[in-house]
Image (tube, rainbow, N blue to C red):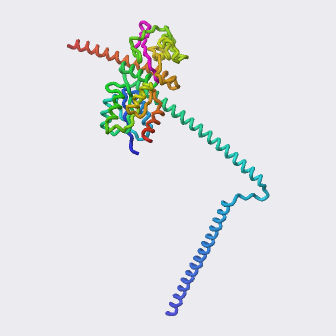
Amino acid sequence: MASLKFLIIEDSPTMRQLIRFALNRIPQTEVIEAADGVDGLKKLSSNEIDLILTDINMPIMDGIKLVTLVRSNDSYKDIPIIIITTEGAKEDKDRAMALGADAYITKPIQANDLLSTVKRLLNL
Amino acid sequence: MDNEKKDKLFEKGEEFLEMFRQGQEFTQELMRENERLRYREVQLEEALKSKLDSPPTLPEGQEASDQLRIYMERIKELETRLGEVEKENVNFAQRYIDVEEQNNNLANLYVASFQLHSTLDYEEVLQIILEIIINLIGAEKFAIFMLDEKDNILLPAASEGIELNDIQPVGLGQGVVGKAAESHSSYYNENPSDSRVDPFEDPLVCIPLLIKEELIGVITLYTLLQQKEGFVAVDFELFSLLAGHAATAIFSSRLYTESKRKLSTYQGFLDLLSQ
């Protein structure tokens, strides 16, 4: 089985570690971390990423801008994106999904929900 | 001599012939045995086939109703066992869910503890506590108060969802926050719904930060994120963890920052003296 590469874009180290913990329960995974949208785009261009997990509220470049840029780029437009955020309002979710996110998870996250979403998006 | 040789040769020839005869008999015996075994195999196959095809025969003298009763008992027994197995399966499934939940909870506690002790920078420690409360507990508005031992007053040190300047200092023993701090015991609001008139006067949770019996501050939660419906078991574990670990992390980082500052002051003096 080929290894899966996940890109976590999140400014909180605590949250990054927690997501990494959950993702590592899927066998043969590689997790790459970025602290903001710009860092995330850099890591995206230098790695073959299978799935992106991003926060919305981040410094330098937020998650919404990142989703827009990823979806407008032919090389990355098919990569599944999961938004993980504290923003629980329906309009926030609708906006993110309309821009091209594939799933929207609110904090505090449940590892099982996150894993089942990842597996669904990657057909695991 | 020739006759003698001929006799010997004849004897040897006879021996060989005898051996061949014996070999021939042995082979024939083997072939007969083989034939017998083949016949037996066919017989057994036929018997098995007829046994499988035909319904079970009743033992001699046994009535059909007795046989039926035996079968019914057997079915009942199997049904009971099936029920037990199904029950066991449900138990296993539930245990699996419980273990999964415990694993997740442990992961949360590990991450929180790991992050709290990952730095000796006071500001970073405060930031990590804020992150834990937002991301792992799901609070929207909350504050960290630190105890000013000189004036016995709790001063706001960090906050989320509210401006730090908008939070009033709290005297020890005053209000919910001050009382929780003074009594060294955590406070959990029995009415955490939105019906609270003033979340700042009537907070959800107050967690005194203690190092053994020494109070150093209080964490106060005012409101939760809209998707967070209430506290779950792991939240209370996190509160306990914060009460102890956040306190030591804050205390250590303050000591470290203070000693670093003093060190640089002493270094400055020494440099002056040596000039």
Q: Relative to the observer, which residue lies in front, B145 or B264?
A: B145
Can residue B244 be seen in this snapshot?
A: no
Quarter of the image holding residue A16?
top left
Is residue B167 found left or right of B270 in the rendered image?
right
A3 up-or-down from B199: above or below: below
**Residue B174 image position (x, y, % from top left):** 49, 8
* Magenta-colored segment: predominant secondary structure: strand
Who's the residue at 30% across and 16% down the image? B263
Q: Is A62 within the magenta?
A: no
B75 up-or-down from B15: above or below: above
Is residue A94 found left or right of B50 in the rendered image?
left
**Residue farthest to the left?**
B275
Q: Relative to the observer, which residue lies in front, B20 or A7?
A: A7
B73 up-or-down from B35: above or below: above
Q: The C terminus of chain B appears in which quarter of the rendering? A: top left
Who's the residue at 53% across and 85% down the image? B12
Is residue A98 found left or right of A60 in the rendered image?
right
Who's the residue at 38% across and 33% down the image? A100
**Residue A86 image position (x, y, % from top left):** 43, 25
**Residue B100 image position (x, y, % from top left):** 51, 34
Q: Relative to the observer, which residue lies in front, A49 or B119?
A: A49
B259 up-or-down from B33: above or below: above
**Residue farthest to the top?**
B151
Q: Is B151 within the magenta?
A: yes
Can residue B86 be seen in this snapshot?
A: yes
Q: How many marks?
A: 0
Chain part drawn in magenta = B137-156
**Residue A93 image position (x, y, % from top left):** 42, 28
Quarter of the image holding residue B120?
top left
Q: Relative to the observer, which residue lies in front, B36 or B7?
A: B36
